[in-house]
Amino acid sequence: MFRFAYPLILILLPLLGVIIYRFRRQQRQRMRSLRIGSADTLREFDQPGHLKIILPDILIFLALTCLILSLARPQLGNVSRDIHHKGIDIMLALDISGSMQLNDFKPNRLEASKQVATDFVKGRRSDRIGLVVFAGESFLQCPLTSDYDVVSKLIREMKIVPQSLDGTAIGLAVSNCINRLRDTEAKSKVIILLTDGENNAGDIAPMTAASLAKEFGIKIYTIGMAGDGSQLTGGFLFSRRIPPLNEKLLKNIAQETGGSFYRADTEEKLKSIWDEISRLEKTDLVSRELMDWQERYLYFIIPAILFALAAFILKYIIWRRAIC
Protein backbone atom coordinates (compact mmCIF):
# COMPACT_ATOMS: atom_id res chain seq x y z
CA MET A 1 0.00 0.00 0.00
CA PHE A 2 1.30 3.43 -0.95
CA ARG A 3 0.44 6.78 0.62
CA PHE A 4 1.68 10.32 1.25
CA ALA A 5 2.01 11.20 4.93
CA TYR A 6 1.44 14.91 4.14
CA PRO A 7 -0.87 14.89 1.10
CA LEU A 8 -1.76 18.59 1.41
CA ILE A 9 1.72 19.48 0.18
CA LEU A 10 0.71 18.05 -3.21
CA ILE A 11 -1.38 21.18 -3.71
CA LEU A 12 1.92 22.85 -4.64
CA LEU A 13 2.09 20.77 -7.84
CA PRO A 14 -0.60 22.66 -9.80
CA LEU A 15 0.75 25.90 -8.35
CA LEU A 16 4.18 24.95 -9.68
CA GLY A 17 2.64 24.34 -13.10
CA VAL A 18 1.14 27.84 -13.12
CA ILE A 19 4.47 29.40 -12.09
CA ILE A 20 6.39 27.52 -14.80
CA TYR A 21 3.81 28.54 -17.43
CA ARG A 22 4.07 32.22 -16.57
CA PHE A 23 7.85 32.02 -16.43
CA ARG A 24 8.02 30.47 -19.90
CA ARG A 25 5.64 33.08 -21.24
CA GLN A 26 7.80 35.91 -19.97
CA GLN A 27 10.89 34.17 -21.30
CA ARG A 28 9.44 33.94 -24.79
CA GLN A 29 8.74 37.65 -24.73
CA ARG A 30 12.36 38.38 -23.78
CA MET A 31 13.69 36.02 -26.45
CA ARG A 32 12.15 38.16 -29.19
CA SER A 33 15.26 40.37 -28.96
CA LEU A 34 17.83 37.57 -28.58
CA ARG A 35 21.36 38.64 -29.46
CA ILE A 36 23.35 36.40 -31.81
CA GLY A 37 27.15 36.70 -31.64
CA SER A 38 27.98 35.34 -35.10
CA ALA A 39 26.57 33.51 -38.10
CA ASP A 40 28.03 30.27 -36.84
CA THR A 41 26.19 30.70 -33.56
CA LEU A 42 22.98 31.44 -35.49
CA ARG A 43 23.32 28.24 -37.50
CA GLU A 44 23.95 26.26 -34.27
CA PHE A 45 20.92 27.89 -32.67
CA ASP A 46 18.65 27.24 -35.64
CA GLN A 47 19.08 23.47 -35.42
CA PRO A 48 18.85 22.29 -31.79
CA GLY A 49 18.73 25.75 -30.26
CA HIS A 50 15.11 25.60 -29.14
CA LEU A 51 15.81 22.37 -27.27
CA LYS A 52 18.86 23.94 -25.63
CA ILE A 53 16.67 26.68 -24.24
CA ILE A 54 13.73 24.67 -22.96
CA LEU A 55 15.47 21.45 -21.81
CA PRO A 56 17.11 23.04 -18.72
CA ASP A 57 13.73 24.51 -17.77
CA ILE A 58 12.10 21.10 -18.16
CA LEU A 59 14.74 19.56 -15.93
CA ILE A 60 14.20 22.28 -13.31
CA PHE A 61 10.44 21.61 -13.44
CA LEU A 62 11.04 17.89 -12.91
CA ALA A 63 13.43 18.61 -10.05
CA LEU A 64 10.89 20.83 -8.29
CA THR A 65 8.14 18.25 -8.87
CA CYS A 66 10.25 15.51 -7.29
CA LEU A 67 11.13 17.82 -4.41
CA ILE A 68 7.45 18.50 -3.69
CA LEU A 69 6.66 14.79 -3.83
CA SER A 70 9.46 14.05 -1.38
CA LEU A 71 8.22 16.76 1.01
CA ALA A 72 4.81 15.03 1.00
CA ARG A 73 6.62 12.00 2.53
CA PRO A 74 5.77 9.08 0.26
CA GLN A 75 5.49 5.85 2.26
CA LEU A 76 5.11 2.20 1.36
CA GLY A 77 3.18 0.06 3.82
CA ASN A 78 3.42 -3.68 4.42
CA VAL A 79 0.31 -5.17 6.02
CA SER A 80 0.90 -7.69 8.77
CA ARG A 81 -1.59 -9.38 11.08
CA ASP A 82 -0.99 -9.68 14.76
CA ILE A 83 -2.91 -12.72 16.01
CA HIS A 84 -3.78 -12.85 19.67
CA HIS A 85 -5.43 -15.95 21.01
CA LYS A 86 -6.73 -17.16 24.31
CA GLY A 87 -4.79 -20.39 24.40
CA ILE A 88 -6.30 -23.64 25.62
CA ASP A 89 -4.22 -26.44 27.07
CA ILE A 90 -5.87 -29.82 26.61
CA MET A 91 -4.82 -33.17 28.03
CA LEU A 92 -6.36 -36.29 26.51
CA ALA A 93 -6.72 -39.25 28.88
CA LEU A 94 -7.57 -42.32 26.81
CA ASP A 95 -8.41 -45.78 28.11
CA ILE A 96 -6.32 -48.66 26.70
CA SER A 97 -7.55 -51.38 29.06
CA GLY A 98 -8.50 -54.85 27.82
CA SER A 99 -12.22 -54.03 27.58
CA MET A 100 -11.42 -51.54 24.81
CA GLN A 101 -11.14 -54.58 22.52
CA LEU A 102 -14.89 -55.08 22.58
CA ASN A 103 -16.33 -54.87 19.08
CA ASP A 104 -19.63 -53.13 19.83
CA PHE A 105 -17.89 -50.25 18.04
CA LYS A 106 -16.37 -50.87 14.61
CA PRO A 107 -13.81 -52.31 14.39
CA ASN A 108 -13.55 -52.09 18.20
CA ARG A 109 -13.75 -49.54 20.98
CA LEU A 110 -10.07 -48.65 20.91
CA GLU A 111 -9.86 -48.08 17.16
CA ALA A 112 -13.07 -46.05 17.17
CA SER A 113 -11.77 -43.84 19.99
CA LYS A 114 -8.42 -43.41 18.24
CA GLN A 115 -10.10 -42.20 15.06
CA VAL A 116 -12.27 -39.53 16.66
CA ALA A 117 -9.45 -38.40 18.96
CA THR A 118 -7.17 -37.95 15.94
CA ASP A 119 -9.85 -35.94 14.15
CA PHE A 120 -10.24 -33.78 17.25
CA VAL A 121 -6.51 -33.04 17.37
CA LYS A 122 -6.39 -32.15 13.68
CA GLY A 123 -9.28 -29.73 14.16
CA ARG A 124 -7.45 -27.58 16.69
CA ARG A 125 -5.81 -24.38 15.56
CA SER A 126 -3.59 -22.82 18.19
CA ASP A 127 -3.99 -24.91 21.33
CA ARG A 128 -1.52 -27.19 23.04
CA ILE A 129 -2.45 -30.83 23.43
CA GLY A 130 -0.95 -33.61 25.53
CA LEU A 131 -1.70 -37.32 25.77
CA VAL A 132 -2.03 -39.70 28.71
CA VAL A 133 -3.06 -43.34 28.31
CA PHE A 134 -4.19 -45.51 31.16
CA ALA A 135 -5.28 -48.95 32.22
CA GLY A 136 -4.16 -50.36 35.58
CA GLU A 137 -1.43 -47.69 35.46
CA SER A 138 -1.23 -44.26 33.83
CA PHE A 139 1.42 -43.37 31.26
CA LEU A 140 2.35 -39.98 29.83
CA GLN A 141 2.70 -40.41 26.08
CA CYS A 142 3.14 -36.78 25.08
CA PRO A 143 3.51 -33.55 27.10
CA LEU A 144 1.66 -30.43 26.02
CA THR A 145 2.64 -29.49 22.50
CA SER A 146 1.35 -27.62 19.49
CA ASP A 147 2.82 -30.23 17.14
CA TYR A 148 -0.45 -31.91 16.21
CA ASP A 149 1.23 -34.37 13.86
CA VAL A 150 3.19 -35.84 16.76
CA VAL A 151 0.09 -36.17 18.96
CA SER A 152 -1.90 -37.73 16.13
CA LYS A 153 0.86 -40.23 15.44
CA LEU A 154 1.02 -41.28 19.11
CA ILE A 155 -2.75 -41.72 19.23
CA ARG A 156 -2.70 -43.94 16.14
CA GLU A 157 0.03 -46.08 17.74
CA MET A 158 -1.93 -46.78 20.95
CA LYS A 159 -2.39 -50.48 21.76
CA ILE A 160 -4.18 -52.53 24.39
CA VAL A 161 -1.99 -53.13 27.45
CA PRO A 162 -0.84 -56.62 28.40
CA GLN A 163 -3.10 -58.48 30.82
CA SER A 164 -0.60 -57.92 33.64
CA LEU A 165 -1.24 -54.17 33.42
CA ASP A 166 -4.99 -54.37 32.87
CA GLY A 167 -7.46 -52.37 34.92
CA THR A 168 -8.96 -48.87 34.93
CA ALA A 169 -7.14 -46.30 37.04
CA ILE A 170 -9.30 -43.23 36.38
CA GLY A 171 -8.08 -41.27 39.41
CA LEU A 172 -4.46 -41.89 38.50
CA ALA A 173 -5.03 -40.81 34.89
CA VAL A 174 -6.71 -37.56 35.97
CA SER A 175 -3.89 -36.84 38.43
CA ASN A 176 -1.30 -37.41 35.73
CA CYS A 177 -3.09 -34.87 33.51
CA ILE A 178 -3.34 -32.36 36.37
CA ASN A 179 0.43 -32.51 36.88
CA ARG A 180 0.88 -31.39 33.28
CA LEU A 181 -1.71 -28.61 33.42
CA ARG A 182 -1.48 -27.04 36.86
CA ASP A 183 1.51 -24.75 36.21
CA THR A 184 0.67 -23.64 32.68
CA GLU A 185 -0.35 -20.04 31.95
CA ALA A 186 -3.17 -20.97 29.57
CA LYS A 187 -6.45 -19.13 30.02
CA SER A 188 -8.36 -22.41 29.83
CA LYS A 189 -7.23 -25.86 30.96
CA VAL A 190 -9.15 -28.96 29.96
CA ILE A 191 -8.97 -32.72 30.46
CA ILE A 192 -10.91 -35.02 28.14
CA LEU A 193 -11.26 -38.42 29.77
CA LEU A 194 -12.47 -41.38 27.72
CA THR A 195 -13.11 -44.73 29.35
CA ASP A 196 -15.44 -47.73 29.11
CA GLY A 197 -15.31 -49.03 32.68
CA GLU A 198 -15.19 -48.08 36.34
CA ASN A 199 -12.29 -47.18 38.54
CA ASN A 200 -10.75 -50.41 39.87
CA ALA A 201 -7.02 -49.64 40.06
CA GLY A 202 -4.59 -46.96 41.22
CA ASP A 203 -3.97 -45.34 44.59
CA ILE A 204 -5.87 -42.10 43.91
CA ALA A 205 -9.66 -41.90 44.16
CA PRO A 206 -11.27 -40.33 41.07
CA MET A 207 -13.24 -37.75 43.08
CA THR A 208 -10.12 -36.76 44.98
CA ALA A 209 -8.42 -36.10 41.64
CA ALA A 210 -11.51 -34.21 40.44
CA SER A 211 -11.43 -31.94 43.50
CA LEU A 212 -7.77 -31.24 42.86
CA ALA A 213 -8.54 -30.37 39.25
CA LYS A 214 -11.18 -27.92 40.42
CA GLU A 215 -8.65 -26.18 42.67
CA PHE A 216 -6.37 -25.61 39.70
CA GLY A 217 -9.21 -24.37 37.50
CA ILE A 218 -9.14 -27.44 35.26
CA LYS A 219 -12.32 -28.53 33.55
CA ILE A 220 -12.93 -32.23 32.85
CA TYR A 221 -15.10 -33.64 30.08
CA THR A 222 -15.85 -37.34 30.55
CA ILE A 223 -16.85 -39.69 27.75
CA GLY A 224 -18.21 -43.11 28.58
CA MET A 225 -18.07 -45.71 25.83
CA ALA A 226 -20.74 -48.37 26.25
CA GLY A 227 -22.36 -50.22 23.38
CA ASP A 228 -24.23 -53.52 23.50
CA GLY A 229 -21.31 -55.28 25.18
CA SER A 230 -20.40 -57.58 22.28
CA GLN A 231 -17.18 -59.48 22.89
CA LEU A 232 -14.41 -60.69 20.68
CA THR A 233 -14.20 -64.35 19.78
CA GLY A 234 -10.80 -64.68 21.39
CA GLY A 235 -8.36 -63.07 23.80
CA PHE A 236 -8.25 -62.85 27.55
CA LEU A 237 -11.62 -61.10 27.84
CA PHE A 238 -13.41 -64.37 28.44
CA SER A 239 -11.20 -65.10 31.44
CA ARG A 240 -12.31 -62.05 33.41
CA ARG A 241 -15.45 -60.08 34.06
CA ILE A 242 -15.79 -56.88 32.06
CA PRO A 243 -16.60 -54.06 34.52
CA PRO A 244 -19.64 -52.02 33.47
CA LEU A 245 -19.47 -48.34 32.71
CA ASN A 246 -19.78 -46.26 35.88
CA GLU A 247 -21.87 -43.39 34.55
CA LYS A 248 -22.50 -41.91 37.99
CA LEU A 249 -18.79 -41.57 38.70
CA LEU A 250 -18.07 -39.97 35.35
CA LYS A 251 -20.97 -37.53 35.80
CA ASN A 252 -19.72 -36.55 39.26
CA ILE A 253 -16.19 -35.96 37.97
CA ALA A 254 -17.45 -33.69 35.22
CA GLN A 255 -19.88 -31.80 37.45
CA GLU A 256 -17.21 -31.25 40.12
CA THR A 257 -15.01 -29.38 37.63
CA GLY A 258 -17.68 -27.60 35.57
CA GLY A 259 -17.39 -29.98 32.64
CA SER A 260 -19.88 -32.36 31.05
CA PHE A 261 -20.47 -36.08 30.83
CA TYR A 262 -21.28 -37.80 27.53
CA ARG A 263 -22.33 -41.37 26.88
CA ALA A 264 -21.31 -42.83 23.52
CA ASP A 265 -23.11 -45.99 22.42
CA THR A 266 -22.44 -45.76 18.67
CA GLU A 267 -19.64 -44.57 16.42
CA GLU A 268 -21.79 -41.67 15.22
CA LYS A 269 -22.59 -40.58 18.78
CA LEU A 270 -18.93 -40.79 19.73
CA LYS A 271 -17.94 -38.54 16.85
CA SER A 272 -20.68 -36.01 17.63
CA ILE A 273 -19.51 -35.87 21.26
CA TRP A 274 -15.96 -34.97 20.27
CA ASP A 275 -17.31 -32.41 17.80
CA GLU A 276 -19.41 -30.83 20.54
CA ILE A 277 -16.46 -30.63 22.92
CA SER A 278 -14.41 -29.07 20.14
CA ARG A 279 -17.06 -26.37 19.70
CA LEU A 280 -17.34 -25.75 23.44
CA GLU A 281 -13.59 -25.43 23.90
CA LYS A 282 -12.89 -23.27 20.89
CA THR A 283 -9.99 -20.83 20.89
CA ASP A 284 -10.98 -17.19 20.50
CA LEU A 285 -8.80 -15.58 17.84
CA VAL A 286 -8.42 -11.80 17.62
CA SER A 287 -6.79 -10.51 14.49
CA ARG A 288 -5.32 -7.01 14.33
CA GLU A 289 -3.87 -5.47 11.20
CA LEU A 290 -0.57 -3.69 11.61
CA MET A 291 0.84 -1.40 8.95
CA ASP A 292 4.60 -1.08 8.74
CA TRP A 293 5.21 2.19 6.89
CA GLN A 294 8.58 2.63 5.21
CA GLU A 295 9.76 6.05 4.05
CA ARG A 296 10.32 6.36 0.29
CA TYR A 297 11.26 10.07 -0.03
CA LEU A 298 14.75 9.16 -1.25
CA TYR A 299 13.15 7.82 -4.43
CA PHE A 300 12.18 11.42 -5.22
CA ILE A 301 14.96 13.47 -3.61
CA ILE A 302 17.73 11.72 -5.54
CA PRO A 303 16.06 12.30 -8.96
CA ALA A 304 15.39 15.93 -7.91
CA ILE A 305 19.11 16.46 -7.24
CA LEU A 306 20.08 14.78 -10.51
CA PHE A 307 17.59 16.80 -12.56
CA ALA A 308 18.78 20.07 -10.98
CA LEU A 309 22.41 19.17 -11.50
CA ALA A 310 21.78 18.24 -15.14
CA ALA A 311 19.94 21.52 -15.73
CA PHE A 312 22.82 23.53 -14.22
CA ILE A 313 25.47 21.73 -16.30
CA LEU A 314 23.52 22.10 -19.55
CA LYS A 315 22.53 25.72 -19.03
CA TYR A 316 25.67 27.20 -17.50
CA ILE A 317 28.49 25.00 -18.79
CA ILE A 318 27.74 23.00 -21.96
CA TRP A 319 25.25 25.26 -23.74
CA ARG A 320 26.24 28.61 -22.26
CA ARG A 321 27.65 29.97 -25.52
CA ALA A 322 24.52 29.03 -27.46
CA ILE A 323 22.20 31.12 -25.33
CA CYS A 324 24.42 34.10 -24.49
Image: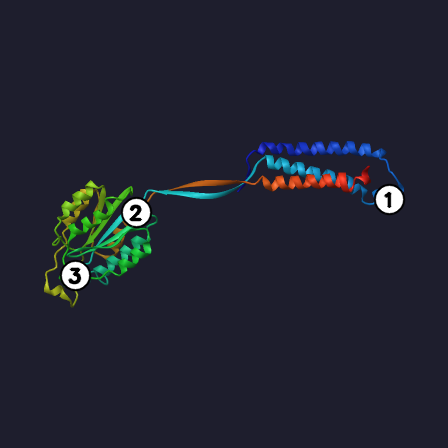
Q: Name the residue type under label 3.
A: Gly
What residue does disc 3 label? Answer: 98
Spatial separation of the CA atoms under disc 2 and disc 3: 31 Å
Which residue sits at x=30%, y=51%?
A: 145
> In front: mark 1 or mark 3?
1
Counting residues from the start of the chain, the first of labels 2 and 3 encountered is: 3
- Residue 235, quarter of picture: bottom left
> In front: mark 1 or mark 2?
1
Q: Which mark is residue 279?
A: 2
Q: Name the residue type under label 1.
A: Arg
Numbered disc 2: secondary structure: helix
Which residue sits at x=63%, y=35%?
A: 68
Q: Name the residue type under label 2.
A: Arg
What residue does disc 1 label? Answer: 43
Counting residues from the start of the chain, the first of labels 1 and 3 encountered is: 1
One can see residue 152 in this view: yes
**Nearer-the-camera pick, 238 or 57:** 57
- Marks 3 and 2: in contact by CB < 8 Å? no
Spatial separation of the CA atoms under disc 1 and disc 3: 110 Å
Numbered disc 3: secondary structure: helix
Which residue sits at x=73%, y=38%?
A: 57
Categorize mark 2 by other alpha carbons within 10 Å: few (<14), some (14-19), many (20+): few
> In front: mark 2 or mark 3?
3
Q: Is residue 240 above or below residue 29?
A: below
Categorize mark 1 by other alpha carbons within 10 Å: few (<14), some (14-19), many (20+): few
Q: Residue 29, how many percent across, how many down?
A: 81, 32
Which residue sits at x=55%, y=35%?
A: 5
Counting residues from the start of the chain, the first of labels 1 and 2 encountered is: 1
